[in-house]
Amino acid sequence: MRKISNVFYIAIGLIVLAVVYGVLAPDSFAERTGHIKNLVASGFGWYYLMLLSVLVLLCVFLIFSPFGKIRLGKDTDKPEFSTISWIAMLFSAGMGIGLVFYGAAEPLSHYAVQSPTGELNTAAAYKDALRQSFFHWGIHVWAMYGFIALTLAFFQFRKGEPGLISSTLKPIFGDKMNGPWGTLVDVLAVFATAFGVATSLGFGAVQINAGLNYLFGVTISTQSQFFIILAVTVLFIMSAWSGLSKGIKYLSNLNLVLALALLVLVVILGPTLLIFNMYSDAIGGYLTNFIRMSFSTSPLNAENRQWLDDWTIFYWAWWISWAPFVSMFIARVSRGRTIREFIVGVMLAPTILSTFWFTTFGTTAIEIQRAGVTNLADKASELVIFEMFNTMPWGVFISIVAILLIASFFITSADSATFVLGMQSSYGSLIPPNSIKMIWGVIQSAIALILLSVNGLNALQNTIIIAALPFSFIVLLMIFSLMKGLNAEMALIRAKARRK
């Protein structure tokens, strides 16, 4: 077995402490983490908006700059995965269960429950609902994932550094990143990854439970969710054991096929023409209002500010907390691509698919709400999509496809996370030991199971959003580190060209 780093033991200790606190004092855990989360949202909301907007600008600059020609690896390296499989893995790791969970529920909420402009059930609210959903799941989040993944891939594959967050800061801090400070950075990344994926497992189990209840009358209960997580744990550990080029690759391709199948079914059976018209209109609204939404903090409107805290700021912190996991995985599967190819692919492909997904499911749900067929707005988020299918032709068949997709996303996310956690626990090894991946798989599932039993998932969600704040400062340092590294690399390339 490869040597296990101190990061593994320290992170396990912190995770155990947090889980024990959540179990022994769940109300106190939820109250304290909720209070801190609210302070972070109200005090640093402007900062999160500025940070992600800067990353968008930086990614656009890198696409058009001479740096875009640099390959993430040796000049002779070729991509390890086909473009389709690569995009499938980006999509599965970066969004996964969230698309199914929020695809109909979020636009419907913006339209009928809590609007960003204060208007409900109007044509303006309809357009705002789609535009804001695009904003939350679009270019900004993928620019952030892309930038962090690019930094990791550049130093790992081009400069030969270990695949660790701490390694990306060596141009600034040098060998200090090999000591306690580097360990601290990597422990924070492991902590955020483990809890972030455990939360996703919990929410995925809740939604699968809701789907099984709708289809087969399975009781919605903690006990049912326990069995769902246990079953999925066995499946994703089997996948993790088979390796990156088999398990995750095949599952990601399956995800893309199932997602496209579900999408096509809803487009055909839903309000088809309206979906395409709303997509065109919403894309126009998204691009027209892109800059304003990127920096809007609503400082003089308390109601709108509360909406921003509940949605946009929450999402920005949530995405930052997921960045160590998603970005490390994206970096690992992107070796051999040029910086230009990498950023264009990461920013555009998932954004295009995600925006059309939200248009399709959001428009269908809102039209059902407008028609008065059923009051979807009163349903829990995990039930909205199944209640929507219940009003459509072939509702049972579509629900079965949706449950299969959720389960496949579920397995892929957990599988990807065990791979990344294994890398971070074995000094950035590109092929982490199966034993370490299995240990992390069991730990992730155990966290989800334990906290589901005490209704602690929301408190866990608060915890990783709080962890996003210190990690965001690491992202700022990564900006300076990457630019320093790229400038040094361009100097080497030019020097080689002159010698020739």
Image (cartoon, rainbow, N blue to C red):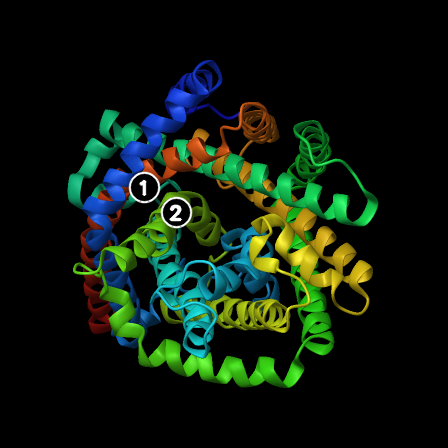
Residue at the location (54% across, 23% down)? Answer: 454
Vertical arrangement, residue 87 with respect to residue 478, above or below = below
Badge 2 amino acid: Trp
Residue at the location (67% across, 38% down)? Answer: 236
Question: Number of numbered discs present?
Answer: 2
Split into 4 quadrants, where in the image is the C terminus? bottom left
Q: Which mark is residue 318?
A: 2
* Mark 1 vs mark 2, CA separation in Å: 7 Å
Residue at the location (26% across, 30% down)? Answer: 178
Split into 4 quadrants, where in the image is the N terminus? top right
Does residue 62 appear in the picture of this structure?
no
Q: Are marks 1 and 2 in contact (CB under 8 Å)?
A: yes
Foreground pick, 337 / 41:
41
Pinpoint residue 251: horizontal percent, then vertical percent.
68, 52
Residue assigned mark 1: 468
Pinpoint residue 159: horizontal percent, then vertical percent.
32, 50
Label 1 crowd bin: few (<14), some (14–19), many (20+), radius 10 Å: many
Q: Which quadrant of the figure has residue 237?
A: top right
Please tell me whether mark 1 sits on a helix, a strand or a loop.
helix
Of marks 1 and 2, which one's residue comes earlier in the chain? 2
Pinpoint residue 416: horizontal percent, then vertical percent.
56, 44
